[in-house]
Amino acid sequence: MSCRMTRRPPSPTSSAWTCVVKSWIFGTITNDLAASISTRDSTARVAWLAVESQFLNNKETRALLLEAKFRNFIQGDLSVAEYCKEMKRMADMLEDLGETVTDRTLVLNVIRGLN
């Protein structure tokens, strides 16, 4: 990706602006992900849609793995406060993935995993 920068801020429709946005996208993701979505002469929009597709396509898998972790999580060496905070964090992450965790389910899982 070759970008030539100018002294003035680029307009949103300029190729320099596209280059800035692509640089930002590729600078904020892992090298492996960048390599998998990188195509020659792609636009910033194409790069963004490729990143979006990677995450949306993995949503179901991430939800299944996180739910298994949530259901099997135990307190172990954590304090009660740390344990409850982690359970709540996992429940919130499941909500973000579209998997509703009721208060009842959260409480039962917390009780089940306590030492």
Image: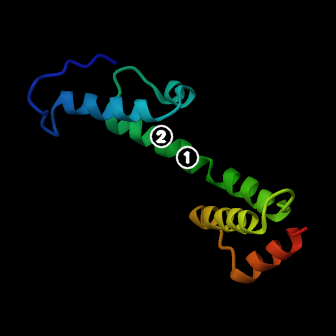
Furthest toward the front, the residue is: 79
Furthest toward the left, the residue is: 8
Question: Which residue is at 75% across, 61% downward?
Answer: 67
- The residue that label 1 is drawn on is 55
Under mark 1, the amino acid is Phe
Q: Quadrant of the C terminus?
A: bottom right
Q: Quadrant of the N terminus?
A: top left
Residue sitting nearer the eye, 36 or 106: 106
Residue 85: give x, y in percent of width and height. Answer: 68, 66
Question: Which residue is at 68% across, 57% downward?
Answer: 63
Residue 25 figure quarter: top left
Do the CB atoms of the residues marked 2 and 1 lie less than 8 Å apart? yes
- The residue that label 2 is drawn on is 51
Is residue 33 depicted above or below 91 in this figure? Answer: above
Under mark 2, the amino acid is Val
Residue 100 figure quarter: bottom right
Is residue 50 depicted above or below 7 in this figure? Answer: below
Q: Residues within 10 Å of mark 1 (few under 14, many from 20)?
A: few
> Quick check: 110 left or right of 23?
right
Is residue 58 depicted above or below 99 in this figure? Answer: above
Question: Which residue is at 42% across, 30% downward?
Answer: 26
Residue at disc 2, secondary structure: helix
Residue 90: give x, y in percent of width and height. Answer: 68, 62
